[in-house]
Amino acid sequence: MIRERHLFGPGPSNPYPEATRALASPLLGHLDPEFLRIMDETCEMLRTVWGTTNARTLPLSATGSAGMEAAFVNTVHPGDVVVVAVNGLFGQRMTDVAARCGAEVVAVEHEWGQPVDVDRVLSAHPSPAIIAAVHAETSTGVRSDVAALGAGKGDALLLVDAVTSIAGIELRADDWGIDIGYAGTQKCLGVAPGLAPFTIDDRAFERRVEKPRSWYLDLGMLGGYVGEASAKGGQRTYHHTAPTAMVASLHAGLTRILDEGLDAVHARHQEAGDALQAGLQEMGLELFAAEGSRLPELTTVKVPDGVDSAAVRKELLERFDLEIGAGAGAYAASVWRIGLMGRNARPDAVLLVLAALKDVLGR
Amino acid sequence: MIRERHLFGPGPSNPYPEATRALASPLLGHLDPEFLRIMDETCEMLRTVWGTTNARTLPLSATGSAGMEAAFVNTVHPGDVVVVAVNGLFGQRMTDVAARCGAEVVAVEHEWGQPVDVDRVLSAHPSPAIIAAVHAETSTGVRSDVAALGAGKGDALLLVDAVTSIAGIELRADDWGIDIGYAGTQKCLGVAPGLAPFTIDDRAFERRVEKPRSWYLDLGMLGGYVGEASAKGGQRTYHHTAPTAMVASLHAGLTRILDEGLDAVHARHQEAGDALQAGLQEMGLELFAAEGSRLPELTTVKVPDGVDSAAVRKELLERFDLEIGAGAGAYAASVWRIGLMGRNARPDAVLLVLAALKDVLGR
């Protein structure tokens, strides 16, 4: 029996039907002119959702976490100072990934649930090579002010995790001074997990590591196949076999999003998130993320005293085929994460998740 | 308009219909018990096609080339001597990947089109940490004797690329002494590209790098989510979001293969390859791979004098929606690669590709 789940956790979300259909389309080879057209259009649409004109904007052939690795492995020279704003699990992970690349990491720790303190991050070191932060912390449901980091970055490169923000809330890589950005397909883009939309500007590319520790994620080599080559209309060099079905699916998801209009898609996420957060508070539940910094697409809510977090999630899954997420890290048992992302940012999804929670909690 | 291509190149091949249908099944979350069951069954079926009982057998969340990277990045300590048998493009690539991991690489060069010279590889260094070879060279269509390397490896670890051999020809990781192996889904497994089936035995795992340069491919961390954890029936630790649609598709492809029977699948590849190679020679074409070492699933054939290789491939694609591959490296214009892999290892595919080539070549 095939289970049909409502994927209302921190991701993956249920894909757009267009994206699912494309997954099952006849497969193309990675050097087929027809596929290269799909790849080029995908890169172009990614530029729109990133808010960038970077030639080197492409879907990496792995999940969002590999995007993080690609960001650091291509730009951190051994001994480089990397200031990382840590206000959740993914900021923490950045410190681990950067350290493996040989960085001297300066972690600026924050209380989880709070946005990044821009002044503290910008004054953490006099001359960092890279300043890194998470735009939308998937672990806490918090939005941080990336534009302010960009305005104050000085000579440093700004490296941003946009896994949970892309196509969900405003994201303007060029205007905000993002030099290196990575994302995932399985959240607000409404596509299955498996690709990492990535962008890097000329400034960062010129400072890149010539021969990074990773062959698979070496942007200099990847540029021969997508991004650079397509922008120049040049010859394609085979690097690795692109996951063609996943790219076709991303193409379909992006087409759907841009047909609807990026502003309309953002507004839909905002409305769904506002309605969900209002409804949860009406039920007497307390939100976890700091007021004023709450993501609409991913809501964190405190588990009421005396309630078994895992038992509630299990009951939601078994009775209603409805998945919500546990908290992350130290908040695993005390916070729930509810995502209404991509296709799921809709009024009926809000009603359903509120009704299901009411039922299970007996409120 | 959707193009339906016959993917008779070196991969991807047309997926099994079961694998395509599974890609478009309702998406599951990566921590859903239903998905974890699919993941565990996938790992178990992978053990069968690898010919191993290794607990740590799993699909890595990226393409086959990332499998190569995972193999080296987890096992090469800086300064380790790594002997690499180079008889094609993928052996060459191994030397690059190993060097980035800090290996002292001893490359044993062969003429392309020839199998690995086991004696030369085994005597290349008195005490290598790792001996690495490609079982089925995708660039040349050549099979090498991995079992002989395993028999003579001594204390070294044997690291094997099985991207084009897995589920196409006999592969017995445990019997042959393969300590570390990686593969891809898009060839004889009959699934879209996007995952790297991987296996590592206890001997290699015990010698692994504790904190490898790659976070994404860190087997110690991945073990908390699949492989190790599932083998022990233990708790799952979130590492990254698994590409759930791709894993479901691999599960369906493996189920199809094991339903047919692995021996029967191998026999089907052998018959299709034999018929193709006989047919090409009857047309007066010359095969490229050394006789006695020819892969049935991937045939290399010399482009006749005076024939424009690219023009023929273009005409095959445009008139018959039939893709064959160019040669690799120095043989780009002088060799074609014809793959009959997975779903395409069938008599009708043999007839079609022979008839199409006859038509285009005017023979």
Image: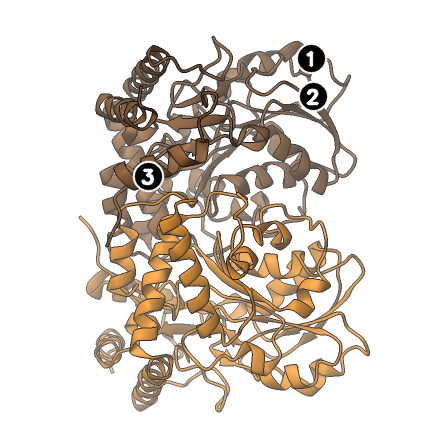
Chain colours: A orange, B brown
Q: Can residue A190 be seen in this view?
A: no
Label 3 to label 2, Cα distance in Å? Answer: 37 Å
Front residue of A276 and A230: A230
Badge 3 crowding class, 10 Å Cα cut-off, few under 14, some 14 to 19, many 20 or more, is some
Label 1 to label 3, Cα distance in Å? Answer: 41 Å
* Chain for numbered disc 3: B
Whether callout 1 and callout 3 share a subunit is answered yes
Q: Is residue B211 above or below residue A139?
A: above
Q: Is residue B38 above or below residue B198?
A: below
Lateral position of residue B237 relative to residue A129, left or right? left
The residue that appears at 60% across and 57% down in the rendered structure is A69
| Residue at numbered disc 2 | B108
Badge 2 crowding class, 10 Å Cα cut-off, few under 14, some 14 to 19, many 20 or more, is some
Marker disc for residue B120 = 1
| Residue at numbered disc 3 | B317
Type of amino acid at the residue the image marks with label 2? Val
The residue that appears at 70% across and 87% down in the rendered structure is A119
* Chain for numbered disc 2: B
Q: Is residue A40 visible?
A: yes
* Residue A199 in the image, given as x and y percentages of width and height: 55, 66
Helix or strand or loop: what does disc 3 sit on?
A: helix
Q: Choose the circle earlier in sequence order: 2 or 1.
A: 2
* Residue B323 in the image, given as x and y percentages of width and height: 35, 36
Label 2 to label 1, Cα distance in Å? Answer: 7 Å
Lateral position of residue B138 relative to residue A81, left or right? left
* Residue B234 in the image, given as x and y percentages of width and height: 44, 46
